[in-house]
Image (tube, rainbow, N blue to C red):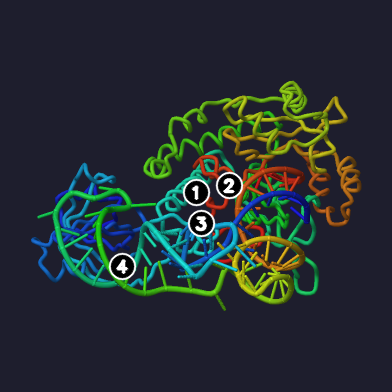
RNA sequence: UGCUCAGUAGUUCAGUGGUAGAAUAAUUGACUGUUAAUCAAGAGGUCGCAGGUUCGAACCCUGCCUGAGCAGCCA
């Protein structure tokens, strides 16, 4: 008799198998019991018929508690009455771990209660589906960049200074010196690109901002590719190919999970068609002004979420907004060749109101210009000597971008809030569990 | 950090000045195909915390704590 996973049940129809499972719910009558089972690969139902298994096993089945773990043995049947398409007719139960008064019931719960029990909430169907899609997007990320000649260069998490100097950093100690948790690996990836051509990082990022919205996490995961001998236009092509590849990966490998989430695959299929629309910041400002919905919006301001949502809704596709004002962007972006007021950059705004998922730019290469910008930004020049070295020794045109993994997951899964896109979210005032 | 809203049974909520309620979960029993099964029974409470007003406060007032939504900031 084979020991299998639920997801492989279709390959074992009419065979007797053994599966290690947890009980998610049960229903029973005097003669028949339905056990809702999960094993981490899928969810399906076990059927226990009293007249077949006898008094003792039937009684044991009826007394199983929610989230109790056990082995079931039985025969797999194809059955149209099951949501999964298959079920197991149980002939034996071997208890493994007891469970009493499991807090998360099949009824509704509030967000706070669920977040306090995040370690258990992860077992439920919706969370299972989101985590599987997250895993697929991580897998597809590695595949995409490896296929396209990138190597992964890990940026440090502990840094001695603020890479961008703009947002709040988590402060810590590095023995007797000050240190900060990384809010971006980008500058290090630029060093990587000058060493190995095309590189990417994929790691945690920390922002000590008092942000409290559905699109913010304090700790999140970012993918930051950086490419040497590359201008912004080629970078945009890589960005849209990468995003489309993520969507395609989920469509190819997560149909079951999309169904659990009620996410319509037809909507996602639209996002695999390239290229994505591109508009300049100037055009975006004009569109917003013409809409008459944003008051006295003036050139030079950064977009808030209502503006981003309006732009993305207009195209119903991910849309690149290019070349923002220099004043609202970080110091390392390449200045526009003919205009003093904008830089060569682009944000990718996700449709359906999910906001910015990528920020990217071509990088400034002139060490003199960079030194000035570092001073202007009020940063300590000495901390950036190593960064300026990259411009002193064989600098080349290069571009890169950063994709926020959880924002992309929230968009692709169609979830309301970013907090369910990461196993243990760190939110303002929440660091338990 | 600002604005708004909320905190009552394990959970989700009703109760807005006069004996603390419902549904659901858990428990016990009935039921041969259930999909949040159904039916019946008993049980379940520091009404967020502290102070005040009142003959009397879950309810009114003040302060504090906790959370949610939106905004700013960002990916």
Q: Earlier in the sequence, mark 2 or mark 1?
A: 1
Quadrant (top left, top right, bottom left, bottom right) of the N terminus of chain A? bottom left
The residue at 59%/44% (across/down) is A407
A339 lies above or below A2: above
Q: Which residue extends farthest left?
A: A51
State which chain disc 3 sits on.
Answer: A
Q: Earlier in the sequence, mark 3 or mark 1?
A: 3
**Secondary-structure class at tag 1:** helix
Mark 4 on the same chain as mark 3:
yes
Q: In which quarter of the image is residue A383?
A: bottom right
Closer to the eye: label 4 or 3? 3
Q: Earlier in the sequence, mark 4 or mark 3?
A: 4
**Secondary-structure class at tag 2:** helix
State which chain disc 4 sits on.
Answer: A
Q: Where is residue A14 in the image (x, y as percent from the top left)?
A: 14, 50
Task: Report which residue position mark 1 lands on.
Answer: A134
Q: Determine crowd level at label 2: few under 14, some 14-19, many 20+ residues with C-alpha closer than 10 A.
A: many
Closer to the eye: label 3 or 1? 3
Q: Residue A405 carries which label?
A: 2
């Amino acid at each position: 008799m084979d020991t299998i996973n639920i997801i492989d049940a279709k390959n074992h129809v009419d065979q007797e198998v053994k599966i290690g499972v947890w009980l998610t719910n049960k229903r029973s009558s005097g003669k028949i019991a339905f056990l809702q089972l999960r094993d981490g690969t899928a969810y399906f139902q076990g059927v226990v018929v009293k007249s077949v298994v006898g008094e003792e096993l039937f009684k044991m089945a009826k007394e199983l508690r929610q989230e109790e773990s056990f082995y079931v043995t039985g025969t797999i049947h194809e059955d149209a009455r099951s949501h999964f398409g298959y079920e197991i007719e149980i002939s034996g139960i071997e208890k493994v771990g007891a469970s009493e008064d499991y807090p998360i019931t099949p009824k509704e719960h509030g967000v706070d209660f669920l977040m306090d029990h995040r370690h258990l909430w992860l077992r439920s169907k919706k969370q299972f589906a989101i985590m599987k899609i997250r895993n697929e997007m991580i897998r597809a990320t590695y595949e995409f960049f490896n296929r396209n000649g990138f190597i992964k260069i890990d940026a440090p998490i502990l840094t001695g200074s603020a890479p961008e100097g703009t947002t709040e950093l988590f402060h810590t100690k590095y023995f007797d010196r000050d240190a900060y948790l990384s809010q971006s690996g980008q500058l290090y990836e630029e060093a990587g690109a000058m060493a190995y051509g095309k590189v990417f990082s994929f790691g945690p990022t920390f922002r000590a901002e008092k942000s409290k919205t559905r699109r913010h996490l304090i700790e999140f995961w970012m993918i930051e590719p950086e490419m040497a001998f590359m201008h912004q236009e080629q970078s945009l092509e890589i960005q849209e190919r990468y995003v489309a590849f993520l969507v395609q990966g989920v469509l190819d490998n997560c149909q079951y999970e999309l169904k659990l989430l009620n996410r319509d695959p037809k909507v996602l299929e639209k996002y695999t068609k390239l290229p994505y629309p591109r508009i300049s910041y100037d055009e975006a400002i004009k569109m917003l002004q013409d809409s008459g919905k944003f008051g006295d919006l003036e050139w030079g301001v950064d977009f808030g979420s209502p503006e981003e949502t309006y732009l993305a809704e207009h195209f119903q596709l991910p849309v690149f907004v290019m070349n923002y004002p220099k004043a609202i962007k970080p110091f390392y972006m390449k200045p526009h060749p003919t205009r003093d007021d904008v830089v060569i950059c682009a944000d990718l705004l996700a449709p359906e109101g999910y906001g910015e998922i990528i920020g990217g730019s071509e990088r400034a290469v002139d060490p003199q210009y960079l030194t000035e910008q570092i001073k202007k930004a009020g940063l300590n020049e000495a901390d950036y000597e190593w960064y300026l070295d990259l411009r002193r020794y064989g600098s080349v045109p290069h571009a890169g971008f950063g994709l926020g993994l959880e924002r992309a997951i929230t968009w692709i899964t169609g979830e309301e809030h970013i907090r369910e896109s990461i196993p243990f979210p760190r939110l303002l005032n929440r660091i338990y569990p």
